[in-house]
Structure formats: C-alpha cells, structure tokens
Image (spheres, grey):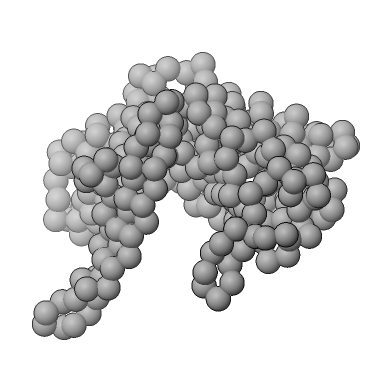
C-alpha cells in the first residue's frame, strides 16, 4: 500500500517523546478506490489526532493565512479553535463533541421540519449542545481577550505607533443580558464576556435555543451557537475584514501570529515551534526585519524561502541553514 511516515523526537518540559505520523492509502478491493488513513503514535502508542497537541505545540504561518483577516468567519473560527485546542485539551474535547452533537441536532431539525421527529428528542440535544457551547464560548472569550492584550502592543510597534489594533469577539449567541424586545443586530462594539460564568452562558444558550426553535425547525438547521461565531479585527476603529488595506491586514496578521506564539508560551509553559513557509516574501523590508527580530527569541523556528537574501545577515549568522537540491536536503556550505 502507498505509505508515508514522519518521525520526530520532541523535547518538552525536560521530557522527550517520540512522535510518529503515518499516512496510508488503502485500496478498496472491489472498486479499487483509495482511502487515506492517518495514524498518530506517541511513544509507540496510538493516539487521536487532537491528543497530539499535548505533545507538540506549533504556530504555523502561511501566506494564505491572510484569509484569517480577509476571509469568511470560518477562517477566524478555525484559527481560534486551533490555538485553543493546543493550549487546552478540555477545549479540544468539547469542540469535537460539539460538532457531533450539532450534526445530530441538525438532522433532527430536518426531520422535525418534515414532521418525522418529536420535540422531546430535540430537547435532549438542546441540553447537550448548550452545555458544550458554554465551554466553547467562554474559552473563546478568554482566549481572544488575552490575544488582544498581546497583539495590540505588537501592532502599535509594527505601525511605528501610528495605528492601534483591537480584537472584538462577535458570538452568534450573545450571553450578555439584553433588554426585552431588543433586536438581534450585528455587534459593533466589543463584548467582554469574561465576567459571565459558564453556567450563565449554558442557561442563556438553552433559553435561546427554545426561543428560536420554530425558526430553526422551519429552516432545518441550528441558527445560533459557536459554529457561527466570529471576531472582528479593528485598526483605529476600522473593520479590517471589510475596509482594511493589504498593508494593514498583513501587519495585523503578523501581530496576531506573534501574539499567538507568546500566548501559547504563557498557556503551556513551553515555546511553540514556529513554522513559517515563504512568509517573508509577503512582507516589505521593514516588516521583514521586525518579524525576524521578534522570532529570534523563540526557542525553535523553521523558516522556508526560495531566496536566502530574504533573511538579514545577523539572523543568518545565528541560524542553521539547510538547502534542498534535487530532492535532497543537506546543511548549506559556505
């Protein structure tokens, strides 16, 4: 069978672990079609993919990460979820379970829309969804506030103190109290939900599901919950998702990724490995130098570039440089 594997020894908190990732393409004996199967082993024991986060933390920076700022809300949710899953195994488990419960509830809503399911069954899944949603909403609110506090001074520095950055959480379900009869409008001002307890969020979410049940049955889908959350990056009050220039958005993305590095260090106690793939080519000379200056403090970084001149001379002097030639990787000589 077509087979590939990646093996590494990772040292974290004075403990060395052997991580192996296998990718196998299995052929169906009847149709001949291939199915990709992934396996993760830690010290020879099979683990779930999400459990790998407790053994290996990394911040990945790709040119297409600009979509976190400029793209659909799903890109920003994935960024938050990926960061939180590395820092908090409980959050990772809740996220995985939420997705399963959401699928079950949506299937029941569809059946209810067609008159093929009782509302009693829906009530059970409402309870499950609300409990898991509370963990996700509170986790995201706390994480985004912490990332905001780290990213803001970085952005101010990267813009030579000309612009400010703010990250506003925009949950699909707003746990903060609203006056009776107030319409659900897009949230323009940032919400600080960190003072609201998980239990308050759970109860409020359950009430919201009951309140919007008829609408959800009519549409056959869950309309409110963490699966529809978003956050808004603002520069000097301007919504970068809609009105940010390419330069502003690139700088905001840079500040966000640098903040993520520090945030994971604070959460886990270890520096994450920083992986940057051809990112420097996206930056102007000043931003490139700022980037290299900030990441010099990270314990281990792996950067790729087609042009070595992208890196400053001081950075090259302290780096181990490898070169790929004809599919072979070897230390660079001279």
Q: Can the viewer see residue 38?
A: yes
Q: Pick whichever, 253 or 201, lies toward us.
A: 253
Residue drawn where x is 52% and y is 20% of the image: 194
Q: Can the viewer see residue 143?
A: no
- Quadrant where the C terminus is found in the figure: bottom right
Residue 111: quadrant of the picture: bottom left
Residue drawn where x is 21% and y is 42% of the image: 45
Q: Is residue 137 left or right of residue 100?
A: right
Residue 49: percent from the left, percent from the top?
A: 31, 47
Residue 18 to residue 250: above or below: above
Residue 216 to residue 259: above or below: below
Q: Is residue 138 left or right of residue 310?
A: left
Residue 282: quadrant of the picture: bottom right
Residue drawn where x is 34% and y is 37% of the image: 17
Residue 78: percent from the left, percent from the top?
A: 48, 48
Q: Is residue 152 left or right of residue 33?
A: right
């Amino acid at each position: 069978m077509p087979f590939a594997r990646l093996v590494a020894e990772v040292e974290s908190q004075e403990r060395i672990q052997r991580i192996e990732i296998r990718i196998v393409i299995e052929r169906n004996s009847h149709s001949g079609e291939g199915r990709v199967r992934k396996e993760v082993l830690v010290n020879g024991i099979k683990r779930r993919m999400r459990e790998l986060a407790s053994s290996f933390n990394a911040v990945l920076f790709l040119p297409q990460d600009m979509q976190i700022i400029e793209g659909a809300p799903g890109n920003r949710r994935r960024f938050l979820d990926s960061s939180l899953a590395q820092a908090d195994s409980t959050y990772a488990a809740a996220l995985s379970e939420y997705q399963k419960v959401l699928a079950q509830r949506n299937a029941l809503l569809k059946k209810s829309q067609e008159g093929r399911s009782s509302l009693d069954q829906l009530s059970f899944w409402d309870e499950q969804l609300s409990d898991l949603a509370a963990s996700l909403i509170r986790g995201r609110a706390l994480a985004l506030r912490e990332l905001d506090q780290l990213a803001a001074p970085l952005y101010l520095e990267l813009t030579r103190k000309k612009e400010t950055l703010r990250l506003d959480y925009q949950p699909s379900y707003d746990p903060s109290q609203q006056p009776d009869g107030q319409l659900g409008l897009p949230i323009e001002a940032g919400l600080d939900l960190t003072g609201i307890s998980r239990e308050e969020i759970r109860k409020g979410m359950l009430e919201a599901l009951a309140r919007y049940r008829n609408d959800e049955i009519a549409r056959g889908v869950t309309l409110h919950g963490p699966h529809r959350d978003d956050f808004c990056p603002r520069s000097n009050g301007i919504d970068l998702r809609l009105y940010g220039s390419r330069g502003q958005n690139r700088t905001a993305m840079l500040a966000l990724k640098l903040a993520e590095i520090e945030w994971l260090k604070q959460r886990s106690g270890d520096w994450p490995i920083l992986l940057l793939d051809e990112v420097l080519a996206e930056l102007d000379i000043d931003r490139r130098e700022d980037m290299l200056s900030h990441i010099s403090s990270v314990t281990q970084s792996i950067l790729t570039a087609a042009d070595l001149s992208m890196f400053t001379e001081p950075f090259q002097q302290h780096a181990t440089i490898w070169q790929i030639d004809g599919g072979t990787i070897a230390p660079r000589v001279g």
